[in-house]
Image (cartoon, rainbow, N blue to C red):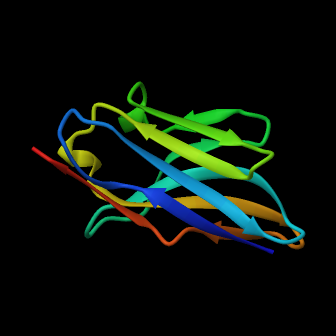
Amino acid sequence: QAQLVESGGGLVQAGGSLRLSCAASGTAFSINDMGWYRQAPGKQRDMVAAITRGGSINYADSVKGRFTISRDNAKNTVALQMNSLTPEDTAVYYCKADQVEPYPRDLWGQGTQVTVSS
């Protein structure tokens, strides 16, 4: 089975950019959809962007035109390029993947903090 390891995140000024990366590692596993979620203090965890194995993409309305999700199926990685960041983007960002083999389950990364200062 697999586990997810995230990298990236940090502190940036409003209008700046950050890139998040996530890699799935393990043995004898396969993954379908991958994506990014975020959770701000006191709020629920919401989907930011998702991408299927075939490359179909879905974005939350609040990030359309600013964030770009991409994946490398051969490397089992997913990335989130975040541009034109605003303080409202401040949250803990989590990578998620839908493991299908050896058995179906949701995989979550450990979370990475993104803080946008005004």
Whether 74 is drawn above or below 111: the answer is above
Left or right of 25 in this view: 87:
left
Q: Quadrant of residue 14?
A: top left
Q: What residue is at 48 percent from the left and 59 percent from the top?
A: 7
Q: Of residues 20 and 34, which is closer to you in this image? A: 20
Q: Which percent across, then down, holds residue 78? A: 62, 48
Left or right of 28 in this view: 54:
left
Q: Residue furthest top?
A: 65
Left or right of 52 in this view: 36:
left
Q: Which percent across, then down, holds residue 72? A: 71, 42
Which image quarter is the C terminus in? top left
Left or right of 101 in this view: 12:
left
Whether 47 is drawn above or below 25: the answer is above
Q: Of residues 44 and 104, which is closer to you in this image? A: 104
Q: What residue is at 50 percent from the left and 43 percent from the top?
A: 80
Q: Which percent across, then down, holds residue 89? A: 28, 47
Q: Residue furthest left?
A: 118
Whether 107 is drawn above or below 59: the answer is below
Q: Quadrant of residue 3?
A: bottom right
Q: What residue is at 63 percent from the left and 34 percent from the top?
A: 57
Q: Which percent across, then down, holds residue 11? A: 23, 54
Q: What residue is at 34 percent from the left and 32 percent from the top?
A: 83
Q: Of residues 44 and 75, which is closer to you in this image? A: 75
Which image quarter is the N terminus in? bottom right
User: How many numbered discs, if any?
Assistant: 0
